[in-house]
Image (cartoon, grey):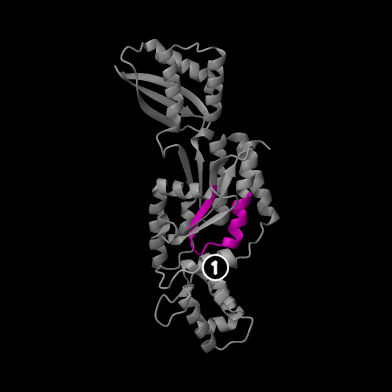
């Protein structure tokens, strides 16, 4: 949406809104979140708790438009909230609901059940599918690969000065990296390095594996020769990958975004959002911003360049382990008319349950 007026702070907007204007604006947003359709003055006159003529309502709507909070999609049409209006509504007027007890019980039970059958990656995937189904939008989670449990590491000689390191995780993820090796490296060093690592990394996360290997190397007073030790370090290092590759993204429930489409413009928006979700780096960057806060964060439309075309919103919360360290972020992506009041507490509670289960508390 194109903003035609200067962007004001929430405090500045509040200072210019009368109680009448606030109520009219609230009704416009509530109607938009429920139907996605513009609301006109005659309809508002039936919805408002006070008695106002359509002419009076139109005057207030014009004031709201000049503040940049609403806009008219067509001539003589009703009004819709702008992205600035949605941000003002979310920050200053949104009344957060609470999860029903049945939803709390379901979320806790399903996440805890997943932890008995899966590693951390599997728990995150199950939680993402769960929250997607409950919210009827796409679920997303980003986590560091350091939390994935390793299964096996192998080294295969490719050429005189190159070898292939193959790392397999418990969730089936495979990482292949070509690494440089000395020309005079004996084949036995590749076998020795793989055996040394596999004895110490199987079933551990990358963080645990690093700590275990470092501890055992100190205890053995460098039992490995220099060349083999370099291979051991390379085997651990490549799991993290190059800068920007150390994060895993899980997306579930994209099909929910095809539900409740009201117009061809909605279909085009979803097509653009699907394209956004394919741009994994952009989604990961956005979720990493969500990690930086203590609670739930909401990103609306073009506030983030990822959604500048699709007009979507992200609601996400950070994931923390038992030591309060950030291990990722979990959330949902959907249209800007997502049910913020219901989904914000849902995301918050699910993130806390996942963090508790991962920490073993």
Q: Examine the image and state in which quarter residue 203 appears.
A: top right
- Residue in the picture at 63% in, 65% down: 95
Asked whether 17 or 335 is in front, the reply is 17
Looking at the image, residue 156 sits to the left or right of residue 119; the answer is: left
Which quadrant of the figure contains the N terminus?
A: bottom left
Q: Hey, which residue is sitting farthest right in the picture?
A: 101
Asked whether 163 or 85 is in front, the reply is 85
Q: Which segment did they paint magenta?
A: 330-349
Crowd around label 1: few <14 · some 14–19 · many ≥20 (10 Å)? some
Query: Residue 13's spot in the image, x, y percent?
Result: 53, 72
Query: Residue 286's spot in the image, x, y percent?
Result: 46, 50
Residue 203 in sight:
no
Asked whether 196 or 227 is in front, the reply is 227
Query: Residue 348's spot in the image, x, y percent?
Result: 61, 52
- Residue in the picture at 44% in, 16% down: 229
Q: Hey, which residue is sitting farthest left in the picture?
A: 160
Q: Secondary structure at mark 1?
A: helix
Task: Confirm whether the magenta stretch covers residue 233.
Answer: no
- Residue in the picture at 52% in, 53% down: 332
Label 1 sits on residue? 10
């Amino acid at each position: 949406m194109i903003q035609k007026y200067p962007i004001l702070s929430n405090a500045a907007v509040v200072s210019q809104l009368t109680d009448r204007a606030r109520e009219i604006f609230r009704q416009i947003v509530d109607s938009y979140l429920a139907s996605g359709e513009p609301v006109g003055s005659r309809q508002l006159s039936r919805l408002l708790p006070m008695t106002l003529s359509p002419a009076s309502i139109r005057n207030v709507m014009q004031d709201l438009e000049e503040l940049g909070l609403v806009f008219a999609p067509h001539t003589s049409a009703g009004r819709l909230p702008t992205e600035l209006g949605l941000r003002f509504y979310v920050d200053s007027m949104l009344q957060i609901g609470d999860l029903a007890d049945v939803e709390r019980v379901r979320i806790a039970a399903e996440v805890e059940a997943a932890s008995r059958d899966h590693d951390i990656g599997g728990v995150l995937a199950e939680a993402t599918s769960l929250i997607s189904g409950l919210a009827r939008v796409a679920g997303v989670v980003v986590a560091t690969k350091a939390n994935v449990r390793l299964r096996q590491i192998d080294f295969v000689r490719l050429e005189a000065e190159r070898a292939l390191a193959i790392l397999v995780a418990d969730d089936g993820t495979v990482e292949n990296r070509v690494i440089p090796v000395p020309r005079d490296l004996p084949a036995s060093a590749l076998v020795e390095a793989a055996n040394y690592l596999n004895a110490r990394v199987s079933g551990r996360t990358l963080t645990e594996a690093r700590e275990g290997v470092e501890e055992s190397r100190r205890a053995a007073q460098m039992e490995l020769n220099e060349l083999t030790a370099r291979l051991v370090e390379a085997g651990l290092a490549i799991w993290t990958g190059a800068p920007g590759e150390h994060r895993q993204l899980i997306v579930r429930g994209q099909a929910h975004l095809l539900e409740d489409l009201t117009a061809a413009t909605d279909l085009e928006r979803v097509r653009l959002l699907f394209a956004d979700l394919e741009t994994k780096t952009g989604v990961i960057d956005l979720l990493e911003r969500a990690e930086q806060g203590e609670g739930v964060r909401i990103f609306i439309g073009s506030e983030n360049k990822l959604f500048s075309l699709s007009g979507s919103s992200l609601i996400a919360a950070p994931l923390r382990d038992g030591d309060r360290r950030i291990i990722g972020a979990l959330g949902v992506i959907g249209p800007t008319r997502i049910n913020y009041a219901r989904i914000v507490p849902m995301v918050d509670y699910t993130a806390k349950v996942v963090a508790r289960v991962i920490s073993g508390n």
